[in-house]
Image (tube, coloured by chain):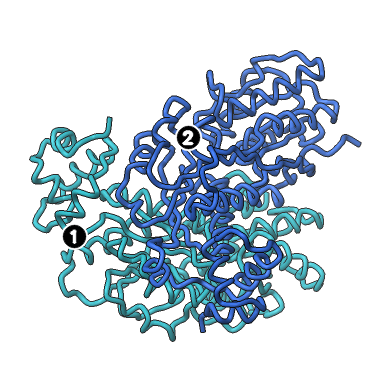
Chain colours: A blue, B cyan
Amino acid sequence: MAATLKDVALAAGVSIKTVSNVINDYEHIRPDTKQRVMDAISDLGYSPNLSARSLRSGRTGVIGLAVPELSLSYFAELADSTIKAAERRGLKVLIEQTGGDRSRELEILSGPRLQMTDGLLFSPLGMSNEDAEYLNVNFPLVLLGERIFGGPTDHVTMSNVESAQAATAHLLSRGRRRIAVIGAHEGEVIGSAGLRLRGYRQALEEAGVPFDPRLLGYTTLWHRSNGATSMREMLASGVEFDAVFGLNDTLALGAMRVMQEAGRRIPEDVAVIGFDDLDEGRYSLPTLSTIDPGRDEIADTAVRVLQERISGSAGDVPPREFEARFQVIERESSAPSP
Amino acid sequence: MAATLKDVALAAGVSIKTVSNVINDYEHIRPDTKQRVMDAISDLGYSPNLSARSLRSGRTGVIGLAVPELSLSYFAELADSTIKAAERRGLKVLIEQTGGDRSRELEILSGPRLQMTDGLLFSPLGMSNEDAEYLNVNFPLVLLGERIFGGPTDHVTMSNVESAQAATAHLLSRGRRRIAVIGAHEGEVIGSAGLRLRGYRQALEEAGVPFDPRLLGYTTLWHRSNGATSMREMLASGVEFDAVFGLNDTLALGAMRVMQEAGRRIPEDVAVIGFDDLDEGRYSLPTLSTIDPGRDEIADTAVRVLQERISGSAGDVPPREFEARFQVIERESSAPSP
């Protein structure tokens, strides 16, 4: 049988009113009380009665999440993290896929289906910084990703430059000097590719290693197949390299497979690092070193901040920017040479 | 600029009225005309104005898709295929994640957020055949998956038994006789595990190979980590095997990695086949043989059938069952021994 508000109150040792306050994210609740209630909600699998709540508050208890494509594993795992973070706060998530297409992203910002949701977590890919004004909407919105900075809404992002710098520094620490990049985007300054490339160049500069543009592998998308194609081109070009930085894990995995077919040993001949910490890289051969970009923290922060904006508990604070903590995960693909 | 109804009509060489009829799925449209309009919609990225449509028809142009978990790659790729199939028919998809939890699945069948959608594609994991009556809802619903058969709604499914039989027969054709199964569920008769195991046993029986219960690796879930753990147990048990049938690709990939750590060569010592044809298996080392279960066909059929039920064009036909065509995909992990 489904757990009730009363069950949660009993389990947390608080009043029903307190549980209700936590769910509706009112202020002035002691952190440990809040935690006890959250834990009880999670343990009991309690799910607020949406109709009743909607009637009471004019809210639906449902938030939207708009992402480019769930077949890009990063977004599938982000969606999963977001749904779990929302659940801990008694919220449901409806997911919409934009294909990374600018016009569809703009459509979502004005779409009628927003009546169904209390707010939106929005991860654009086609829109750019010039489109920032379109984020000025009349409903709670939290921006995710690296396409737009300094916009009119709260924004949760990765530490792209710093973590890419750390990934590159990790390869340099293994004695590698010719570090190829897979996934660069021509002329991009911001966006994931632009920012990560900036981190790469900063790390080279700090180490006094010259930048060689021939080591940049361009791809339009970031699927495994793009990583494979880009690596094939790089091998055909004859340029020498002893390491690869895949700007995401799937690019690195696609590239790794092509190098193995070509007889390059990983990590002996070529050390490899990716970015995203996908589950997949824990089981590949070799396992894939990567950047953990703090996906759970991103999801958790985004849901919390959106809920603050929905409930009004954030007051009139101006748009905030949150950057998740990252971590270099060392695995077999960049193990030290014996 | 977004394409209009008029752009689509021009591109397809038909009247605006005809485009509108196709979008609203009226009957009596010639198949080739319909195809031309669909192609034009797809080429131009035309997206019907949902508000206008909703006002006219009382419909939202949005369908729901409820799946267990997007972090299970199969469901991420199914969601992607479904969104693309829906797009070709001018529909949007809202995704809900159930965690494969029965009570949440039941909640979705009675949830208030169904007001937002015209119908639901429903892929349960926690519900079982005894719950079939709950599918008797007052909105259009199409069932996906293998948990419930003979229910009160249209149902689109894989050919589980036949394709698992073909996967096993493929390993037998490579001269393997000791075929381990990773991902079995204790006592399950239907459900993906139960049906695929039935196909496995039928193939053994046909080939006159005795069934050995020690070759069954049980797992609760079907993530990579479950495949790895199950394979570790099997290796520790000392039972001999020369092939592995992973009941899905992620199980096979997790198991493959553990075998490689233990020094088993794939396919020389152990031939491996999975199930699902995930993109990931095209880039693993070795590439993974698998069953293509017809995911695009499943998605396309499900959306088409749901649209028929929404528009009423299916009339009063009783619940139908659709089984997608499958294919054995031979890759390196089960290549013939030289």
The residue under the point 52% across, 82% down is: B189
Does dot 1 land on a helix, a strand or a loop? loop
B112 on left or right of A149: left
> Quadrant of the rendered structure where residue B226 is?
bottom right
**Distance of mark 1 from mark 2, alpha carbons?**
35 Å
Occupied quadrant, residue A164? top right
Q: Nearer the viewer, mark 1 or mark 2?
A: 2
Tell me what residue is drawn at x 59 percent, y 37 percent: A321
Residue B315 percent coordinates (x, y): 15, 70
Callouts 1 and 2 in the same chain? no
Q: Could you say which quadrant of the image residue B1 lies in?
A: top left
Residue linked to disc 2: A152
Chain letter belonging to callout 1: B
Q: Taking the image as drawn, is residue B132 in sight?
A: yes
Q: Nearer the viewer, residue A15 or B118?
A: A15
Q: Horizontally, is B285 left or right of A204 in the view?
A: left
